[in-house]
Amino acid sequence: QVQLVESGGGLVQPGGSLRLSCAASGSISRPNTMGWYRQAPGKQRELVASITSSGNTNYADSVKGRFTVSRDNAKNTVYLEMNSLEPEDTAVYYCNLVIPIVYGSRNYWGQGTQVTVSP
């Protein structure tokens, strides 16, 4: 059983910074991809950033240059450093882990952490 536990959300003013963390536990094989999605009220869940176990990263255009995703493979932990936050970044942020299997992949989600950017 794989579990993802997120931390680090909260309330921040525009222009501020936050760091999210997500620790995965259980049977986790490599290669895999860990990342962050977000869902704002009334909108679909969207990819924010992801990083493979070999270090390849992918970012949504809206966060490029402001957010940085990183991971510690020894701790099975992924981080999201968010700078220059904007009100449009307000959402519930979900940690995601994808593990390839023979005929597809297994997808795991965290419980979500609220990020609110407001004066």
Image (cartoon, rainbow, N blue to C red):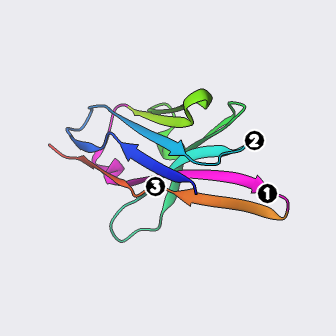
Is 95 displayed left or right of 30 in the figure? Answer: left
Q: Is there any visible trace of residue 40 in the rendered image?
A: yes
Q: Which mark is residue 79?
A: none
Cα–Cα gap, marks 2 and 1: 10 Å
Identify the amino acid type marked 1.
Answer: Ile
Name the residue tied to disc 1.
101
Cα–Cα gap, marks 2 and 3: 19 Å
Residue sitting at x 52%, y 37%: 78
Q: Which residues are magenta?
A: 83-102
Quadrant of the frame with the C terminus: top left
Question: Do tag 2 and tag 3 residues touch (Cβ < 8 Å)?
Answer: no
* Circle 2: element type: loop
**Residue 30 x %, y %:** 74, 41
Name the residue tied to disc 3.
110
Name the residue tied to disc 2.
31
* Circle 1: element type: strand
Give whichever of 16, 18 is nearer the camera.
Answer: 18
Q: Categorize mark 1 by other alpha carbons within 10 Å: few (<14), some (14-19), many (20+).
A: few
* Circle 3: element type: loop
Identify the amino acid type marked 2.
Answer: Pro
> Does the magenta segment cover residue 42?
no
Identify the amino acid type marked 3.
Answer: Gly
Q: Relative to residue 8, is residue 90 depicted above or below?
A: below
**Residue 77 x %, y %:** 52, 36
Q: Quadrant of residue 25?
A: top right
For this orientation, the residue located farthest to the left is: 119
The first of marks 1 and 3 along the sequence is 1
The first of marks 2 and 1 along the sequence is 2
Give whichever of 113, 30 is nearer the camera.
Answer: 30
